[in-house]
Amino acid sequence: MCKIHAAITGVGGYVPNYRLTNEELSTIVETSDEWITKRIGIKERRILKPEEGRGISYLAVKAIEDLQSRRPFNPLEVEAVIFATTTPDYGLPSSAALTAAQTGMTNAFCFDMEAACSGFIYALDIADGFVSSGKYKKVMVIAGDILSSVTDYEDRNTCPIFADGCGCVLVEATTEEVGLMDSILRSDGSTPEHLHMYGGGSVYPASHETVEQRMHYIWQDGRIVFKRAVSSMVDACEELLKRNNLSKENVDWIVPHQANLRIIDAVAYHLNVPREKVMINIEKYGNTSAGTIPLCLWEWENRLHKGDNLILTAFGAGFTWGAVYLKWGYN
Ligand SMILES: CC(C)(COP(=O)(O)OP(=O)(O)OC[C@H]1O[C@@H](n2cnc3c(N)ncnc32)[C@H](O)[C@@H]1OP(=O)(O)O)[C@@H](O)C(=O)NCCC(=O)NCCS
């Protein structure tokens, strides 16, 4: 019997209309276009303004509609919707359920999952488990965040980085030699103090004090996160390449989480992969957390060929990180 693989058969994406430029940000906190461009590599980021819409499901519905326009599919055939996000619309119900209801995926079971910036690769691996087991044939993976809703616009260590955006991929069963080939996913929850948002959970439910102490915003120790991000993504990619007998020549694309251009460049340098093979769009979209990798696939879709070898890699709060080896499924 042929092995069942889980292949991406369509990509959609959406970023909000409003462009928050480095120039505008420099009027809000003490920073400059020059500093942000040099130290982070971002020129502008998209922000969802209430005039346009509210909540991550607003972006997700737009992303699904975009996927539908590029690669029509019957929403009633989708059996599961997995939504990777750290900024769901509400505590409950899930944004997956809200999005499915608005896009006709009414036969699917739906759930949100949180792995911060590694959310997309985690969700893709879960979808692969569902599909390659033979139990399900069509799974929608959605990944994105409204990081502007948890960003402290008085903290110049974080506000230039974070942004809003959402992508989605349809994952389907195939017996062809394409799709998700292998993955390495890791996490280490021993040092939450380096990157966290403590307010609003069951330890610190929302209160006047948590709001006053700005605990509903993401806080990070940028230097520690930077170092861990580079070493973790490089280690995961090297292990994945080795155990799949892949050399840098066989790899067509590295698709890294877009957190900082210097992190991306350091990962490419350690893997000895030229920049031409690395998907980079951080300069215009910033760090949309779980959204960055699907938004790269969305933008590069018409440059991808069936059988291309892609290495997806991410790092985020948790810490969470990993790498996925994917053979692209269509032209
Ligand atoms: C946050 C980050 C951009 C800071 O860049 P950095 O080069 O490490 O900068 P440092 O923290 O060493 O700070 C250097 C100086 O720049 C200053 N600085 C920090 N942010 C600044 C800003 N936006 N504008 C101007 N100056 C800034 C600092 O105050 C510091 O000044 P000092 O030397 O007088 O104390 C960087 O560490 C980073 O990207 N880390 C990873 C973050 C990340 O990826 N988070 C998401 C996880 S997925």
Image (tube, helix red, strand yellow):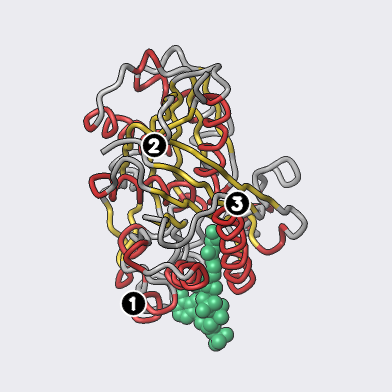
- Identify the residue at horizontal 41%, vertical 78% (top origin): 31
The answer to the question of whether label 1 and label 3 lie on touching residues, with beta carbons closer than 8 A, is: no
- Identify the residue at horizontal 44%, vertical 59% (top origin): 258
Q: Position of residue 171 (x, y in %)?
A: 42, 29
Q: Residues within 10 Å of mark 2 (few under 14, many from 20)?
A: many
Is 324 in front, or is 76? 324
Q: Which mark is residue 243?
A: 3
Is 265 in front, or is 193? 265
Q: Position of residue 273 (x, y in %)?
A: 42, 67
Q: What's the amino acid at mark 2?
A: Cys
Q: Which residue is mark 2?
A: 168
Q: Is residue 279 left or right of residue 4?
A: left
Question: Can residue 155 be spotted in the picture?
Answer: no
Q: Which residue is mark 1?
A: 33
Residue labelled 1 has its Cβ within 8 Å of some atom of ligand 1: no
- Identify the residue at horizontal 42%, vertical 22% (top origin): 100
Q: Is residue 166 left or right of residue 131?
A: left
Is label 1 in a helix, a strand or a loop? Answer: helix
